[in-house]
Amino acid sequence: MKKKKKKDNASAELDGLFPASLTDLLTAGGAEFLERVGPDVVRRSVLQVLLGHNVRTQTEPLTRQRIAEVGGGVLAMFEKGHRLNPDFFRRLSSLAASRVQRGGTRENAWPAQWALGLTGKGIQNVLRSDIGALDAFCETLDRAISLAAVSLTEKIGPLSMALRIGIDPVNDSPTLGWADVLRILTAIGCAELTIRGSDKSRYGKLFERLVLGSVLTLLGFHLDNRRAGSRNSRVFWLSDSTDERECDATAIIRPGIIARFDIGFIGIGNPEIVRDKLSRFARSIEAIGHTDASTTFIVVDRIPTGAGANTLRIAEKSGTSVTQMSMTLWPRELAKELSEKVGHVHQLCNLDDTATQTYIEQHVSSIDVRVFLRSANARE
């Protein structure tokens, strides 16, 4: 029992060192973080996707901002830990291992993992999810850091760096050497890996809703997530975690005529995903029989090179429309598909490139993109 109590006390020494003012960067879902950066930033990002730009280009600044702020939080964690405990760096591995063994919430678990040079995936892959292997892992980590510090001292020279946060003079500001700084850099590097992995999933799902909701609004549909409004035509709703999720959005063109939408930011490296989407809809039609009452529209980043002919053949067979977001002004192409397949006529169909871009820019500026997130289960 004493050993258990010692571990609890040790891990508690690490808790609360990551700044409380930044913990929302670790705990908040994607929707909350987008609220934090502001609707104007999000709206500009959505506009760029509607004009044919890569969604990753739009989400990278958001991810980079989060990584930078989290990195600052990690630095503050080390500064506070060393200021409160002169033996902090020497005891860091045991403190962090105790916290990882106990588990806990993200604001406590993630910084502890990073201090050990690990991420959640690292615990699964390096330790094979065996928390009991942490002691041996910590020994090898400490040895690797020490050897690297010695090597850098020989090859570059000794390092002496003061670390202080705050404007008030502090006489006993921590002075760090190579080994201390390498521990900080290791933790910040792992923090970036964690954030990138988290954001890849969170922004992909969120921007699917943002882009699909925006383009349908742009094309004259009205959001009705209650699915029981007074309108019975030109309305749509977005699927959420409570749906069986046959599609990402459903639109009622007019009574009896329905359009289903499936969206994915699928790049050239994943040709099988586009085919799987189309094959799934084709099998559905074969099972229930073709009907003009429901038509499926698939929106993807691009059709992978070499898969175009087969993809379009499957699409034609299933009566499915495929629109590529990599095409400039692709909302106009989607408008034409809607006009041809379900009779939803929109003025975009007849506009030239300049007028189309102007129309998209003007109308996106008036869309409240936040409404597309409020019904989403956006937390990871």
Image (cartoon, grey):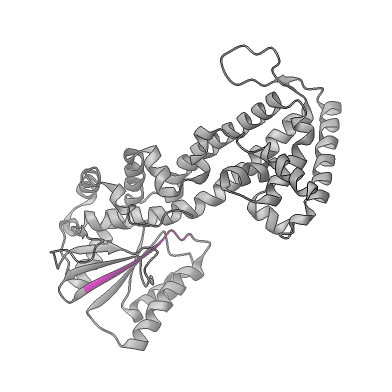
| Residue 4 picture location, percent across and down | 76, 49
Q: Which residues are magenta?
A: 258-267
Compared with 32, 326 (above or below) is: below
- Identified at 69% across, 49% down, the residue is 100
Residue 350 place in picture, x, y as percent: 16, 57
In the image, residue 246 lies in the stretch drawn in magenta: no
Relative height, residue 301 to residue 309 (above, below): above
Q: Which residue: 49% across, 37% down?
A: 65
Residue 293 vs 264, above or below: the answer is below
Q: Quarter of the image holding residue 295? A: bottom left
Q: Residue at x 53, y 51 (%)?
A: 198
On the picture, is 123 further left or further right than 349?
Answer: right
Q: Position of residue 86 (x, y in %)?
A: 75, 25
At which x and y percent is residue 177? 77, 25
In depth, the one of 127 and 361 nearer the eye is 127
Left or right position of 378 against 80: left
Predominant SS along the magenta part: strand
**Whether residue 326 is visible:** no
